[in-house]
Image (cartoon, helix red, strand yellow):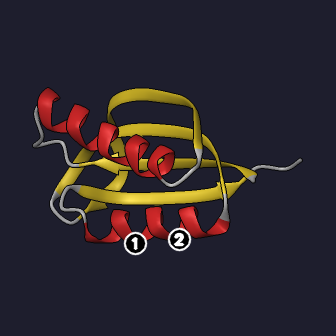
Amino acid sequence: MNAYESMYILSPTFGDEEIDGLISKFDELITSNGGEVTKTDRMGRRRLAYEIGDHTEGYYVVLYFNATADIVAELERVYKITDGVVRYLIVRKDK
């Protein structure tokens, strides 16, 4: 398993319960497939550098985890189809 870091931005229209639900959903996706979430860093609402869609701000979350390539591919697929994920990025950390 490799170490990965993922940052995703959630829609600012979501309330705290919806944000907590999505964060739990992504964490559970990794752990249920045999990965390990090492840290979830909630950066909170921040202004975007440029407007994305109709959004000028978003809720930033950084996720640190260990996983296989299959788990990363599934996480990316779920990011794409989940309403409310404005942007995401997944990078493999150096060894």
Q: Are marks 1 and 2 in contact (CB under 8 Å)?
A: yes
Which label belongs to residue 42?
Answer: none
Q: Which residue is mark 1?
A: 77
Q: Is residue 29 left or right of residue 72?
A: left
Q: Where is residue 12? Give x, y as percent.
A: 18, 42
Q: Where is residue 22? Give x, y as percent.
A: 26, 43
Q: Is residue 60 left or right of residue 57?
A: right
Residue shown at 65%/57% (left/top)? 91
Residue 14 quadrant: top left
As shown in the figure, which amino acid type bears the numbered disc 1?
A: Arg
Above or below 12: residue 77: below
Q: Is residue 66 left or right of residue 88?
A: right
Q: Is residue 72 left or right of residue 76?
A: right
Q: Secondary structure at mark 2?
A: helix
Above or below 45: residue 11: below
Residue 46 quadrant: top left
Above or below 28: residue 69: below
Q: Where is residue 48? Give x, y as percent.
A: 35, 47
Determine if residue 58 is in view.
no
Q: Which residue is mark 2?
A: 73
Residue shown at 33%/70% (left/top)? 80
Q: Which is nearer the eye, 18 or 36?
A: 36
Above or below 13: residue 76: below
Q: Dot 2 surroundings within 10 Å: few (below 14), some, or many (20 or more)? A: few
Q: Distance between the Cα atoms at labels 1 and 2?
A: 6 Å
Q: Secondary structure at mark 1?
A: helix
Count of numbered marks: 2
Residue shown at 10%/43% (left/top)? 13
Residue 39 quadrant: top right
Residue shown at 41%/51% (left/top)? 29
As shown in the figure, which amino acid type bears the numbered disc 2?
A: Ala
